[in-house]
Amino acid sequence: MPKENLSFSKLASPSPKSGLAGAWSRPQALLDLGGNVAVWAEQGNAKALSQPLRPSPWLVLHGGPGGSLSASHVAPLRYAGLPWFGFDQRNSGLSEDLDLSVIDLQRYIDDALDVADTLEIKQFHILGGSWGATLALALAAYRPERVVSVVLRAPFVPLRSRVDAFFEALENVAPVYFADHFGPGARTSTVCECFDVATPEHLVELSIAWSRLETALLTGEPLQNSKSGFLSDTQELGLVRKYRLQAHFLKHDCFLGAADWDKLVAECAQAPWKLSIVQGLADRVCPPGGARMLSESILRTSLIELQGTGHLAQSGAMLTALSEAVSQHHLPA
């Protein structure tokens, strides 16, 4: 669809009747932003859209890097009846791939702003989870005047020590299986180097291994000794695409070195937008320490901690807490 014929009101579809309905096999629009970017938008309910109280829509940022926008990410906004828009990030989901050499954090920030500009959205709230929370903070610090408020789920803190701890957690899931694929004691640098030098066949093996270990960490279920189920060529290529992108970002500390991260957090601490963080205390992928670190540095943060809740967006307690948080952000100050 040509940019000049597009706006949020033209693109946004009515909200579905079910808050969790709507897994997408095709985008509502493909925007040519130097490579096609897949975009979706929904109107929210009639009351939320009534003038002159029409709220700014929510920009939804998915995790990864290498994930894709899904119904679970937007469910809190659907339950709250609020308008939203979102997109699959570069080299993710239904968006077009670019060479990894031109992919970095700033490219993702620019894409988000380009999508908002194309949809004629001057200001927006942000809902981001995991890596999407990192991207949300970077975007909100870069253009604070565009951002009304921010809600984060289980923020990923891209400090090398914390990423190394993530790979240690993967190793602890199945030490022998981990060592067979990445080497005993492998951490960020080694795992990323494996992806840099791997043959196409080895990339498939590495990606399947990372996926299986991460799934076990997410669910808390032991890694089965048997081989993973049959994957089609398309599924294998999808895993390679996802984990090559993750390795690219993690190799470069998500383009936020320690000093850059400290500067980003300091800028967020001075920004005017409201901030809430929802964190599961049983999260083994992005443990509670990251959310607490942010809340201690950004003093206006409202931190909601959920007992017995893990990382996934679709858990009942997480969905309820996020829906309440986004609703609170629309109450008059």
Image (cartoon, rainbow, N blue to C red):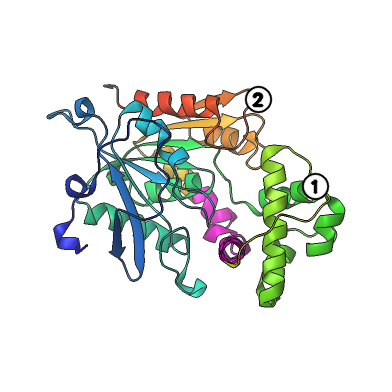
The mark lying in front, picked from 2 and 1, is 1
Q: Is residue 257 above or below residue 196?
A: above
> x, y (%) of residue 3?
19, 62
For the residue marked with disc 2, what is the amino acid? Gly
- Closer to the camera, 288 or 223? 223
Answer few, some or many: residues within 10 Å of disc 1's Cα (few below 14, many 20 plus, some between 14 and 19): few
> Is 284 one of the magenta-colored residues?
no
Image point (39%, 57%), residue name? 109
Q: Main secondary structure of the magenta part?
A: helix
The circle on residue 308 is 2
Image point (43%, 45%), residue name? 23
Q: Which residues are magenta?
A: 234-263
Which residue is the site of mark 1? 224
What is the CA distance from the residue labelled 2 to the residue labelled 1?
24 Å
Query: Under tag 2, what secondary structure?
Result: loop
Answer few, some or many: residues within 10 Å of disc 2's Cα (few below 14, many 20 plus, some between 14 and 19): few
Q: Is residue 97 visible?
A: yes
From the image, which quarter does the C terminus lie in? Answer: top left
- Closer to the camera, 289 or 13? 13
- Closer to the camera, 252 or 280? 280
Look at the numbered discs 2 and 1 and tell me whether their residues touch, using CB distance below 8 Å.
no
Tell me which numbered mark, 2 or 1, is placed earlier along the sequence. Answer: 1
Query: Under tag 1, what secondary structure?
Result: loop
Identity of the residue furthest to the left in this view = 52
Q: Is residue 184 left or right of residue 132?
A: right
> x, y (%) of residue 44?
27, 33
> Is 256 one of the magenta-colored residues?
yes
Image point (59%, 36%), residue name? 293
From the image, which quarter does the N terminus lie in? Answer: bottom left
Q: Is residue 154 above or below residue 240?
A: above
- Closer to the camera, 79 or 26? 26
